[in-house]
Image: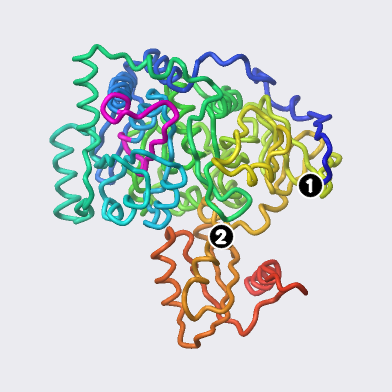
Amino acid sequence: MVDRKIECKERPWQSHYGAGTNLELANFEFLNLADMVTKSSVKWKDKIACSMILPNGMEGKLSFSDVEIYSDAFAIYLREELKIAKGDRVAIQMPNCLSYTIAVFGIFKAGAVVVNANPLYTAYEMQHQFKDSGAKALIIIDMFADKLKEVVPNTNLETILLVSVADFFPLIKKTIVKTVLKYVKKQVPNCEVYSTSFTKAVNLGLSLQSSKKLNPYKYWNSVTLDDLAALQYTGGTTGVSKGAMLTHRNLMANMYQIVEMGKAKIVPGNEQLLSVLPLYHIFAFTVNLLTFYYCGGESVLIPNPRPLTNIKKAFDLKDITWISGVNTLFNGLLNEKWFAENPPKHLKASIAGGAALHKAVSDRWDSVTKTKVVEGFGLTEASPVVTFNPINGVIKFDTVGVPVPSTEVVMLNEEGVPVALGETGEIAVRGPQVMKGYWQRPEETSKCLKEDWLLTGDIGVMDPDGYIKIVDRKKDMILVSGFNVYPNEVEDCIAKLAGVGEVAVIGIPSDKTSEAVKAYIVRKDQTLTAEKIIEHCHKFMTHYKVPKLIEFRNELPKTPIGKILRKNLREEALKTIK
């Protein structure tokens, strides 16, 4: 790529937003995200902010006023008891539950930085993320506390707070759920490291607040829009997991951009959003948690959507108006008889992201629910939303929509020069939602941030109206149910196993998960089996990264200099499938 200034000379999308959509964001009305939370809590104080519904229909809920009180208390606990300072990192590792909202907002109010972690991570993955981020405290679901003995000694973690999925439920319901999980289902192991319960931490914060007359405002009033709000870990354009530095400005800008694109149908204070996607994923973090809190909506939390019958009671008990999800969720719901025969009556629209939306699924969803699935495009490094189909304008199914307000998008050729409309190129993005860079990785940052432009690694084409179609994704990335899987990471894991000579990993189409991981292996030890490889992978990687298919080969295709040609394997696999 040549070193020249990138310019966006055409913005045809601005005439296709739909009536009432602002072309540019106005000045931000809040000092930071803590300020947003506090003012939104006051504005919507009597409304339900979040509810969690278990498969049996048992429900727990928090009002906006509850969230404000408890997150204030948690901020006080972090600052006064744990001596967490402004800018310190606090990790969160839990599924969708009531505690998640309190924890995130309390961290914001303490002036600290959220580090989201997948609760299904292996000890190896946890150790890398916590050590890399320098997190001082971890709030973790008790179901996975058995991993901590191996993890904690190799990190900077000083405090462990355990969360129960039933925390903040009414006392009787909480007791029943905790008893069933621990003694009947035996899903709560003993924690072998010193820990405190999250609810005790919140209660201590309440006590400190009362006795010392503390106001968390003093912690966050000096936090600026350009201070870090979250480290969101991603592979980026390589397989090395690294933290995207997202500022208060980045996340708040994306919140405003989402509101602009959807405000024709969003009624403030009167929405119920089904939160099936995990809130630790950047898509749900920004859309479900931040945006709908700002809008006074109720987030209906589903801690575990598998099997999909776990969601049924949420539809029975709530007037769901919005659903955010990936293609596999929408397809799965359509294949559930209970959903297809009784679709949600109050649904306005659904938001698709994280994976390509199949036309057959979109068409059937339209037919069954009489509403649209609206697709967009984004990535962690952009907080995440870059483009979206205008809900109040023309929706083009075969595209990911148009750039959101205050966002410029160009397609670059191999020399880094913008191409004409209708020509393919690498998608480059500039806007207030683009990350500050990768945490403590200046070299990696310089590879994807050129001036103010984020080079996504995705190949796209923009039509004359400014609508963008994704032609190809990042060169080798595999997308499993909306989650990025990087071949380098999987290959590195497999290569550590004795008996493996060479390994190559690709993604192949899957009806269940969009793509599935397939590994091609040349064995040094002919007794090595697929079962042994899969067992090995499960020790070091989250389940969705583990190969579903393994094929043994005598040799792998390579370039003249010896580089394995994944694209050849991918082409071969696609021909076989066809």
Instruction: Give the residues drawn in magenta, as a range.
Output: 78-99
Badge count: 2
* Element assignment for label 1: strand
Give above or below for 303 relative to 328: above
Query: Which residue carries the number 2 mark?
Result: 515
Label 2 vs 1, first from the N-terminus: 1
Quadrant of the rendered structure where residue 247 is? top right
Dot 1: within a 10 Å radius of its alpha carbon, few (fewer than 14), some, or many (20 or more) residues? many
Residue at screen point 62% across, 42% down:
442
- Of residues 469 and 448, the one nearer the viewer is 448
Give above or below for 531 relative to 272: below
Residue at screen point 40% across, 13% down:
43
Q: Is residue 36 visible?
A: yes
Q: Position of residue 119 (x, y in %)?
A: 37, 49
Query: Which residue carries the number 1 mark?
Result: 425
Amino acid type assigned to the residue bearing label 1 in the image: Gly
Q: Position of residue 215 (x, y in %)?
A: 31, 14
Q: Which mark is residue 311?
A: none
* Element assignment for label 2: strand
Q: Is residue 262 visible?
A: no
Q: Is residue 141 left or right of residue 260?
A: left
Residue 93 in magenta stretch: yes
Q: Position of residue 154 (x, y in %)?
A: 36, 52
- Report the Cα–Cα distance between label 2 and label 1: 24 Å
